[in-house]
Amino acid sequence: MTDTPTASQPTAAVKSPAAHEAPIIQIDGLDKTYASGYQALKSIDLEIQRGEIFALLGPNGAGKTTLISIICGLVNPTGGRVIADGHDIVHDYRAARATIGLVPQELTSEAFETVWNTVSFSRGLFGKPPDPAHIERVLRDLALWDKRNNKLITLSGGMKRRVLIAKALAHEPRILFLDEPTAGVDVELRRDMWNVVRRLRESGVTIILTTHYIEEAEEMADRIGVISHGEIILVREKQALMRQLGRKELMLQLATPLAALPEALAGRGLTLDDAGRQLVYTYDAQQDATGIAELLRAVDAAGLEVTDLQTRQSSLEDIFVGLVKEH
Ligand SMILES: Nc1ncnc2c1ncn2[C@@H]1O[C@H](COP(=O)(O)OP(=O)(O)OP(=O)(O)O)[C@@H](O)[C@H]1O
């Protein structure tokens, strides 16, 4: 950060997402072409609702960091407009930036500074008067209170991650960007971080996270946006996405392996798997007529003995991979 925003910001917390409210971030026709001539963002339109957790998914180089960096005022857009909590991020930069907290992937310097000083200093950068009670609340919420007098260099990797969040929250932002919040952390810490993020949302903070872990989006997000080659190719409520694009598979375990699919079962969308020991039927679980009963009758009529069966719901990962491949 080279700037020192000074504008004050509203402090009222919003308790839950409300579709009728104006979006907290409004992005219209956002373009970015780097000096090299590379077009990293192509006319992005996106709205982030107040109080939601929004996960931005995309393969490497899709444009996630560019998009976040523009919203946070670290990279200049080539065209288009972004309004953050009522403030234009270019023309009203300081006020816009004061509403935003950014949690980068890594803690850079300050190794010999204490937790308390580092976090308090971050608040000062935004021109906010000291508020030890707020800093204490943030440190307690992140289970860092006992470590407040520790130098950063003495903290574990997980604790350092928490300090990054504390720093981003020191100036009471209403929007929090988390860039790959759990990259490279162990499973236990990842679950811990998810709980921290959920508590923040409950306190009224709107959260936008980028992630490579589909599981993270599946677990946390209210809505999911997929970006690929600088374009937003999909934005959907997570539940709706999983319902609409999710497929189910029925696996039938056979008593005797088959060398090939019998003629009688051709044209039913079946595949043979597991060296001929398993028949796999893919169907749309939303349809009334899944075709399962008819399939089982046909399997029986073909003289095949089924020893076991299972179903599997496609995961967000399957959906994501399919979407990006299509695009
Ligand atoms: N300063 C720059 N100059 C030129 N091209 C850049 C610059 N920064 C990023 N790019 C290019 O823009 C594209 C988008 O990069 P960006 O970092 O936004 O992607 P990302 O989705 O965040 O990727 P990752 O998941 O790998 O972090 C990439 O092709 C990248 O090489």
Image: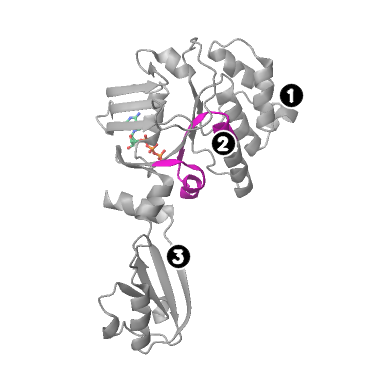
SS for tag 3?
Answer: strand
Earlier along the polypeptide chain: callout 2 or callout 3? 2
Report if residue 1 is visible in the image: no
Residue at point 62%, 21% (across, down): 119
Q: Where does the image place residue 309, in percent across and percent down from the top left?
A: 47, 75
Residue at point 67%, 27% (across, down): 139
The answer to which image quadrant residue 260 occupies is bottom left
13 relative position to 160: left or right: left
Above or below, 115 against 266 in this view is: above
* Residue that lies at the very extreme toward the bottom in this rendered image: 303
In this view, the residue in front, 214 or 148, is 214
In this view, the residue in front, 125 or 248, is 248
In this view, the residue in front, 65 or 215, is 215
SS for tag 2?
Answer: helix
Residue at point 40%, 67% (across, down): 249
The three-letter code of the residue at mark 2 reads Val
How many labels, in total? 3
Determine the CA span between mark 2 and mark 1: 24 Å
Q: Where does the image place residue 253, in percent across and percent down from the top left?
A: 45, 79
Mark 2 or 1: the one toward you: 2
| Residue picked out by circle 1 | 149
Magenta residues span 198-224
Where residue 57 is drawn, which disc sits there? Answer: none
| Residue picked out by circle 2 | 197
| Residue picked out by circle 3 | 312
Q: Crowdedness of circle 1 by 10 Å Cα count: few (<14), some, many (20+)?
A: few
The three-letter code of the residue at mark 3 reads Arg
Above or below, 210 against 1 in this view is: below
The three-letter code of the residue at mark 1 reads Asn
- Proximity of marks 2 and 3: CB atoms separated by less than 8 Å: no
Determine the CA span between mark 2 and mark 3: 29 Å
